[in-house]
Image (cartoon, grey):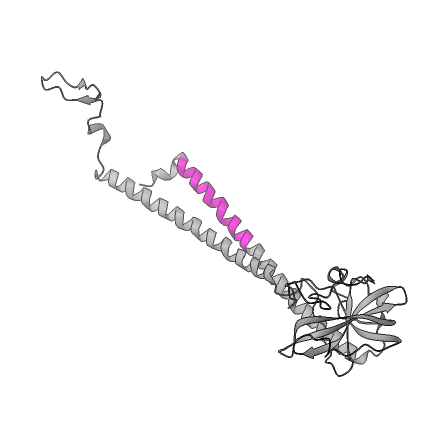
Amino acid sequence: MYRFLLTPRWWGINLFVVLAIPLCIFMGSWQLSRFEDRVQDHESAKEHVKEQAAESQADTKGRPLHSLLPVDKETSGEQATATGRYGKQLLVPDRELDEKSGFYVLTLLRTDDGKSLPVVRGWLPGDASDAKAPAAPKGEVTVKGALQASESPGSNGVSATGGLPAGQVGAISSASLVNLVRDDLYDAWITLDKADSGMKAVPATAPNNTGLDLKAFQNLGYTGEWFVFAGFVIFMWFRLFRREAEFARDARLGLLPDPESTPGPESAPDPTGGGNKPVAPPA
């Protein structure tokens, strides 16, 4: 009954199924492992930030800025110190703190080596306004705060919208600030552990590419797609097998017409008893 499984056509179908199912399972498992790795990175990054915050309370000195650059997953959140004079001040709107909407006060610190370091001096509630933002201290200052990598629009709550008013910036990064200031900028910034002038200190955040972002959920979606495709391959094989088995059963029971007993279109019975004779095709 199942001799059709030995035909070349079914050899090809079976070979495809045997190869496709393990491939789908492998790819689905790989995508799932990628998602789990991103979850683990996210948890590790959160723990790292908590550890750095706890250490910052005990660390009253911090480390020189240049010894922590460039910023990576290990140095992000470390307490850094820098000395210089405050310069241009900008506002970073649409930033939440304690589930309230507000803005950061960002001031550039021109260091002794001539480069400027973006410093978040604190957070204020409400809409961004120069009138609300306190002026930066005068003269030479030494700042200490958590070192942060340049932000990327669309990550960690950073707005990707443009068209901001003059004096405002959406993302704290050298790429965004280079169009607003003439200073030579560090590819990093710090958030003060103690905010200035009655503002709230902005806590450090996990570095980029360590959160449960869109890429992580894309990996999870691809996992489901590969496993669904494996199930679809099995479903289609079973459907074809059942259809072929039913066809073979009907043929064995004589339920299908015998093509040899059906007169073909090229001939017709001869009424004179001389057998079939060709029939001319219609004009």
- Residue in the picture at 78% in, 82% down: 197
Above or below for 255 versus 213: above
Above or below for 67 versus 252: below
Q: In front here: 114 or 138?
A: 138
Q: In front here: 189 or 138?
A: 138
Look at the magenta stretch and give its main secondary structure: helix
Q: Residue furthest bottom?
A: 198
Residue 53 vs residue 239: left or right? right
Residue 235 vs residue 44: left or right? left
Quarter of image, res 116:
bottom right
- Residue in the picture at 13% in, 19% down: 270
Instruction: Point out the image quarter for the C terminus.
Output: top left
Q: Residue furthest left?
A: 272
- Residue in the picture at 49% in, 46% down: 20
Q: Is residue 14 magenta?
A: yes
**Residue 26 point in image, percent of width and height:** 55, 52
- Residue in the picture at 59% in, 61% down: 214
Q: In front here: 279 or 226?
A: 279
Above or below for 279 versus 60: above
**Residue 16 point in image, percent of width and height:** 47, 42
Residue 4 vs residue 276: left or right? right
Q: Is residue 149 magenta?
A: no
Q: Is there any visible trace of residue 123 in the rendered image? A: yes
Quarter of image, res 38:
bottom right
How many labels were placed on the picture?
Answer: 0
**Residue 72 point in image, percent of width and height:** 76, 63
Instruction: Point out the image quarter for the N terminus.
Output: top left
Magenta residues? 9-28
Q: In front here: 123 or 75?
A: 123
Q: Is there any visible trace of residue 67 in the rendered image? A: no
Residue 237 vs residue 82: left or right? left
